[in-house]
Image (tube, grey):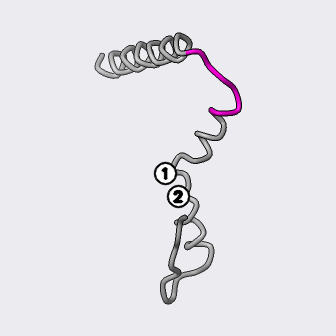
Amino acid sequence: MLKTVVKEGESIERALKRYKRKFRNTKVLQELRDRQQYTKPSETKRQTKQKAAYKQQYLRSLEE
């Protein structure tokens, strides 16, 4: 369970923003979305390879 203590003099909007950032970093929402639909291990492996290839190509283009 996430807890966010509102510091003295801090606005509620700022504390809410900190809470949302903490929640996003726990990746709970991403895990829920992943569990909604089953993906085969081969599909997961293929997606990670595609992401790696894209990232490598992107970094190469920045170097040039």
Q: Where is residue 2 in the image (x, y as percent from the top left)?
A: 53, 65
x 50%, y 79%: residue: 5
x 51%, y 88%: residue: 9
Residue 34 sits above or below residue 16 on the image: above
Q: Where is residue 58 in the image (x, y as percent from the top left)?
A: 40, 19
Mark 1 belongs to which amino acid? Asn
Mark 2 belongs to which amino acid? Arg
Quadrant in which the C terminus appears? top left
How many numbered discs sit on the rendered protein? 2
Q: Position of residue 54 (x, y in %)?
A: 45, 16
> For residue 33, which quarter of the picture?
top right
Binning the other alpha carbons within 10 Å of mark 2 as few (below 14), some (14 to 19) or many (20 upward) gives few
Relative to 39, is 48 on the left or the right? left
x 53%, y 46%: residue: 27
Residue 46 among magenta residues: no
Q: Position of residue 19 (x, y in %)?
A: 55, 65
> Label 2, on which residue?
21
Q: Which residue is more in the foreground, 56 or 6?
A: 6
> For residue 35, which quarter of the picture?
top right
Q: Which residue is more in the foreground, 53 or 43?
A: 43
Residue 31 sits above or below residue 63 on the image: below
Q: Which residue is more in the foreground, 6 or 64?
A: 6
Relative to 29, is 21 on the left or the right? left
Secondary structure beneath disc 1?
A: helix
Quadrant in which the N terminus appears? bottom right
| For the residues bearing labels 1 and 2, Cβ distance under 8 angstroms | yes
What segment is highlighted magenta in the picture? 34-40
> Label 1, on which residue?
25
Label 1 – label 2 distance at C-alpha: 6 Å
Q: Which residue is more in the foreground, 42 or 14?
A: 42
Binning the other alpha carbons within 10 Å of mark 1 as few (below 14), some (14 to 19) or many (20 upward) gives few
